[in-house]
Image: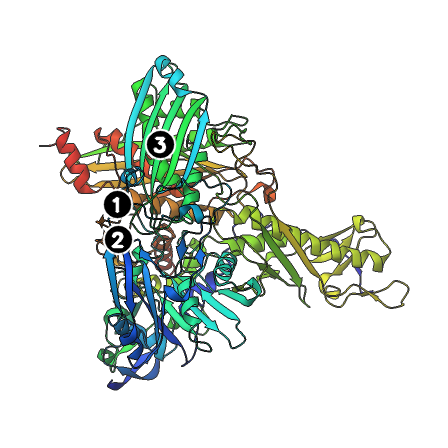
Amino acid sequence: MAQHLIQMTVNGEPAVAAVPSQMTLMECLRERLGLTGTKCGCAAGECGACTVILDGEPVNSCMVLAVECEGASVRTVEGLSRSGKLDPLQAAMITTGGVQCGFCTPGVLMTARALLDRNPHPTDAEIREALVGNLCRCTGYLPILEAVRSAATAS
Amino acid sequence: MSAKKASPAPLASPIGASPPRIDAHEKVTGAVQYTDDIPFGPRLLFARIKRSPHPHARIVKIDASRARALPGVVAVVTGEDYPGYIGLYLQDRHIFCRDRVRYVGDPVAGVAAISETIAENALELIDVKYEVLPAVFDPEQGAKADAPLLHPKLEDYVVAPFIFPQNGTNISNHFKIRKGDPSEVWGICAAIVERKYTIPHIQHVPIEPHVAVALVEDSGKVTLWASSQSPFAQRNLIAKTLGISQSDLRVVAPAVGGGFGSKAGVSMEALAVAIALKTPGRPVKLRLTREEEFHTAFVRQGLIAYFKMGCAADGRLLAMENRYLWDGGAYTEYGVNVTRAAGYSSSGPYEVPNVHADSLCVYTNHPVGGPMRGFGMPEMHVGLEQCIDDLALQIGMDPVEFRRLNCLKTGSTLVTGSKMHPIGLPECIDQAAKAIGWGSKAAPSSPRKRRGKGIALMWKAPAMPPNAGSSAWVRLNEDATLTVGIGGQELGQGTFTVMAQMAAAALGVPMEWVRIATPLDTEYSPYEWQTVASRLTWSMGNAVVNAARDARGKILKVVAEAWNEAPEDLDIVNGNVISYKTEESLPMKDLVVYGLPRPDGKGWTGGPIVGDGNFMPTYVTGLDKETGQGERAVVHYTTGAQAVEVEVDLDTGRVTVLRGVAAFDVGRAINPGLVRGQMEGGFVQGLSTALFESLQLQEGVLQNPSFVDYRIATTADAPEQVEAIMVEVPQDDGPWGARGIGEHPMVPTIPAIANAIYDAVGIRLSSPPYSSEKVYLAMLEAGLVD
């Protein structure tokens, strides 16, 4: 099976991985780079658990081939906090109760981060629309929406 | 002695406070390890499962020779290798099918290979010859005497003493209530309602699919890592079926990405162990795909429910005659107890003098029914709570008033004949009605929409063996922080945080000093039956409190000896041992590992402090097989009420839930923030099942095993607000009076929404989900739209 050597910037640092053609970005992050914070919930682009920020856009990393990411910049949940300081979204998720089992949490955080990066003060409707592809079975979404609102207000 | 005078200012008790959950930080940073995140190195093998394409067939022959020859395949396993039966309450299944398959997806063979792709490819090379058998897709058909028998050896199966299989039929449990005689009072009822409701199969949909990794060492020792609610039950059941000691099977249970019952008992975990036994020295990982998750672990069984209930002119309920036919699926090893729970709770939270109820678990050629959040109660309450509404409306009584009149109160006689313990249900009703603005109707958001309000009650007891137990230990560290060992799992509900609160409060230290020993590991963690039944806050909580008190007693004994005082005069406050007599104070860290010098200077006293404790209810009695009557059927009931406001779109049939109110008697909210999380999350899960969810089974084949075709609620569907109201009537044997609240918030949601739809547009649907299409067609039929 042909392996391709790809170079990316992951969470601000250079990363190199040898990947087969059909390997997804999600698998590459988890299995080649040890970044297991990105989760696999369906491998079909339907649940949002594997959301990462790829060149500024939130994507389901299970729907992107790793070889497509040559030269790209990828941000994962592991890159959200900086020098031990939580991103305001992470802090807000803790205080509002937006985290229960935690499995959707990385994807939710990356989608919300991408939203706030391009729209620092979203309306409630915009927050709901942005997160509509991130399934959560525990919280009922209300504390997650509250966390995004509160992080937007704080920043 | 380093004692010094001090006047400790006690910290506010952690009980009733809402500290942030202790696992939140590792979850928001992605650091927490779920089972699939653990590295197992390059020797790891991957397993895939060959599954039955038929709902019911005899296995004539399995030829795996071509699969075994595929390069990269390390082992192929079939039912031939494992003759044992497995099951929680009724041992009715093999790990791999042996003589026949009973549902589409039944495991026939397993492959371990060096990659998932090779394992998947190998499945195609396993040739299985089947002889197709007539199948059962409907519990009513299946319960008939002439139905094809799915388990001809039912009478030989090992079964729990409180489950009653009907040999020679497909009925694997028949629970009966015979209390009074409804036939004698139908004639004097002012109103009688008779209805049939059909509840479809649904699935739990944890966002993390099932995953298990098994390793068999040369010594024969087996280790299983699994996304698990039940490491101890899995150890016990798998060890028994393999004929090995529980001591030689170690189950490690890392973080769980949602369970809702699907990861209780044993489902796919035994497959991983069975395959790994053929690859000694090499770990084997089995991950369910999302498609497999939808129908090959557990599903929530379907239900056909018949209700007949009647009341007097003054509204008092006089009689109920309820018949529940559960579509238990191919194996009902766990589902038989869902049937039992629905039986002993068959009246709902009402005092009814005459009740006949039959709850039957019926084998069908459908996916395996198992435990799901609510354990039969959400399904049963759907019809029951709509009939209650209908009955109230028929006699011209307000549904809230009707419920207030008939609901269980302290001392009421239950459907099983026992007495209701102190209960806050009436207050829950009052508070829910008030919060939703019962009796008033706001204008709809457009002229082509209609608004309505609905209410529903619920009750639920922990459904478990009468003697399900918990245990815990508390170990003090050098700096007086403590590590608490428990065997109950953090599923997202927040139990680790609640246990830390309880340990801190019982010992007398700040909560920040408490660590929970993770991951759960049957080799090091104390025994816990299972993380199910909303039983941990109460049962495991009691064990933790007992362990912390044990440690506290040992600490005080050491200090008492060193200070020449009586332990009764000592206390632990803020992590300091203090004497009320001498006002001396000693930081715990000075003694909890190294002990203290004796007062006479000759030697030492004490040693590393370890406390242990357990809890097991001892008072649950059996119920009579023919009448379902007995002294005490369950440990306790958690009760509550939900009210909702909906808007129905006349042009599309779309139902929008605008807001919800959840009021439950939680005994005591140890952590109100986490309780609110359960109430909100449970409400939206209930909403999702009310409006969207159904496993579409056609001739036993699942038509919608994906998130596109099986939709769950998203951010677009969550209401603006779910108000969480905590009523606190203490549980006599609960820690600080607490009882469980994990499952309950999704129990009354479907009927509350159904009653609100009726209030809005006057239609009732006999079966959820209340999709736009179904609601629109019903409105069309009723002449509401044209």
Task: Name the residue type under label 3.
Answer: Arg
The residue carrying mark 3 is B323
Secondary structure category for the residue under label 3 = strand
Label 1 and label 3 in one chain: yes
Secondary structure category for the residue under label 1 = loop
N-terminal-most mark, 1 or 2: 2
Distance (Cα) linking label 1 and label 3: 19 Å
Identify the residue shown where x is 17% and y is 34%.
B778
Q: Nearer the viewer, mark 1 or mark 3?
A: 1
Q: Chain of mark 1?
A: B
Q: Which quadrant of the figure contains the N terminus of chain B?
A: bottom right
Residue A37 shows in the view: no
- Tag 1 near tag 2, CB within 8 Å: yes
Distance (Cα) linking label 1 and label 2: 9 Å
Badge 3: how crowded within 10 Å, few (<14), some, or many (20+)?
Answer: many
**Where B701 falls versus B141 (above or below)?**
below
The residue carrying mark 2 is B55
Q: Chain of mark 2?
A: B
